[in-house]
Amino acid sequence: MDRPKILVVGSMNMDLVMYGMTDLPKWGTSAFCTEYQYAAGGKGLNQSLAVALQGADAFLAGRIGRDDNGKRLLEQAEKAGVRTDYVKRDENGLTGLSTMNMGEDGKYFSIYAPGANRKLEIADVENALAHQSFDMIAMQLEMPLEVVYHICELGRKRQIPIFLDAGPAMSIPLERLRGAFVISPNEAETEALTGIAPDTMEQIEAAAEKIYREAEPGYVLLKLGSRGAYLYSREHRDYIPGFRVKAIDTTAAGDTFGAAFCVQYCMGKCLEDSIRFAHAAAAVCVTRKGGQPSIPTKKEAEEFLSEHTP
């Protein structure tokens, strides 16, 4: 398949990114950063842009407010080639806002105000499915959880593969995710979902097995940062190493990984090759500043993959 059609459902935020933080503030105190910038973001918007840059037809279902931030996000998505037919404006709400607080080592913490993202409804997704046929649906948890659960049910009923990037980190009933094709949390999200920190191979296997047993997806795909990824199912117990690069900013790396995996898999690549390509795309992403500005094209990921070995 040359250009798969992928529907991304999720959040649209304006990100305020602050760089160079050395300490976390305590209540009643201030912390300083070296510089800041505004950037279009939100896990849904990031993933849809990454899907488009990776060579698929990307459609986005989401919500924005009637404000300048919402207008800018819509323009950014459309400029990147994302179809925004299923993005709605909330007449009375503000567009989502996230502060991304970056440390000198490239790691970050964020503070998230969901705004109009809270108004996303399953009807928005059903409307998209009524007008288009999709090869896959990708989603995250930055939206009402009942919508997430319902999409899993829709995927099972309509036999559409559902890729769930299980972020941000939160504890949710895993059985409500039945119907997902791939559940893919990072390290913090894995611990939040299972209560198991994936620090050792034994813990990694135990966490993956718990998700697989309770949520019954096709596959569990744990993202382990610079250590790589772990793929788990009845037939698979595979550790796929990643690439070691100097990380500048890890914002959008997980979104890039998930998008690249989805596109490669929909193009007919095997699971392992799809994961390796996703590693390459994420590795390029973390060597650049910003969320969406750091997301690579398919060609850039291909070039990185041809020049590096895990």
Image (tube, rainbow, N blue to C red):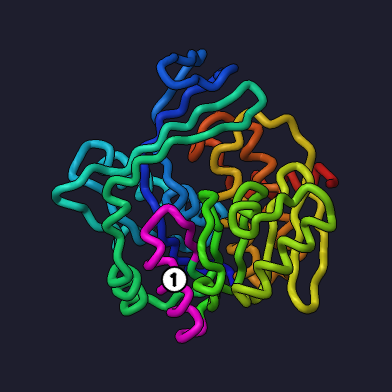
Element under disc 1: helix
The quarter of the displayed image where residue 76 is located: top left
Asked if residue 238 is positioned above or below residue 307 in the image, the reply reads below
Inspect the magenta stretch and tell me whether residue 250 lies in it.
no
Residue lying at 59% horizontally and 17% vertically, measured from the top left:
22
Quick one: which residue is furthest to the bottom in this view?
157
Residue lying at 65% horizontally and 76% vertically, measured from the top left:
218
Quadrant including the N terminus: bottom right
Quick one: which residue is furthest to the left in this view?
91
Inspect the magenta stretch and tell me whether residue 147 lies in it.
yes
Residue lying at 77% horizontally and 64% vertically, measured from the top left:
272
What percent of the width, then of the height, locates residue 211?
Answer: 65, 67
Q: Is residue 308 visible?
A: yes
Q: Relative to residue 301, is residue 23 drawn left or right? A: left
Which residues, given as a range, are shown in magenta? 138-159
Q: Amino acid at mark 1?
A: Tyr
The quarter of the displayed image where residue 73 is located: top left
How many numbered marks are there? 1
What percent of the width, then of the height, locates residue 214?
Answer: 62, 74
Asked if residue 13 is positioned above or below residue 268 in the image, the reply reads above
Q: Which residue is mark 1?
A: 149
Q: Relative to residue 138, is residue 232 drawn left or right? A: right
